[in-house]
Amino acid sequence: SRLVLYDSVDGRIGQALRAEDVGPFMEWAQGLLGPLPYGEELRIVSAPTSWLGFEHPANIVLREDLGTQREVYENPVLHTCMHEVFHQWAGNRTTIQSAMDFAWKEGIAEYLTYVYEEERRPPAESIKTRASWARIALLAALFPRPIPAEPASVPPLESLAVDSYGTGPMLLFLQLEPI
């Protein structure tokens, strides 16, 4: 696969995404999930956005000041990039049925990013990721659960996003690991 970066003038994202970090991650991810589903090229762009990052088939947007977000992840640019790459399979290739399934696409991407950090990156990265989940979980208003039908009103996307990264979905995945 080929990654193409379109960075801002100051080049902060490009400076933070080192080939020696991204290359092994891409090999690992594709070894786990298969080739990128939308062709050999994956485009990454830095831009002003309220999200840390978001994805679209074969495209990823990373927040231009992402490197300054150290309170969330130990290596925020790499972590967010890896998370968004996983969405090429979880969230783009497979689609959620309803807004209430948002936690599952986000949970899968976040969990797989954590697994890579735990297996292949310095220990501080996975430790900080787990601490971030615990902190974010304190804000949760919704919890993933099987529901027979869409609720009468869907919570705002901001609430769904916060609730998707919390301890609930992540602990479920960690508990399923031995199985």
Image: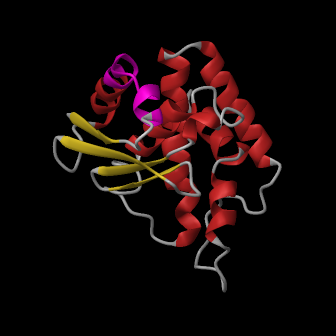
Furthest toward the bottom, the residue is: 152
Task: Give percent across and percent down for residue 114.
Answer: 55, 30
Can residue 179 be seen in this snapshot? no
Is 132 in front, or is 143? 132
Q: Is residue 18 magenta?
A: yes
Q: Quadrant of residue 148?
A: bottom right
Task: Give percent across and percent down for residue 17.
Answer: 42, 28
Can residue 88 be seen in this snapshot? yes
Residue 170 relative to residue 120: left or right = right
Looking at the image, which residue is at 34% across and 31% down?
A: 29
Q: Is residue 150 magenta?
A: no
Residue 152 relative to residue 29: left or right = right
Task: Give percent across and percent down for residue 3.
Answer: 26, 36
Q: Which residues are magenta?
A: 12-24
Furthest toward the right, the residue is: 138
Furthest toward the left, the residue is: 39
User: How many labels, in total?
Assistant: 0
Above or below 151: residue 131: above
Q: Main secondary structure of the magenta part?
A: helix
Q: How is the image coloured?
A: secondary structure
Looking at the image, which residue is at 16% across and 41% down?
A: 40
Residue 46 relative to residue 134: left or right = left
Task: Give percent across and percent down for residue 104.
Answer: 53, 54
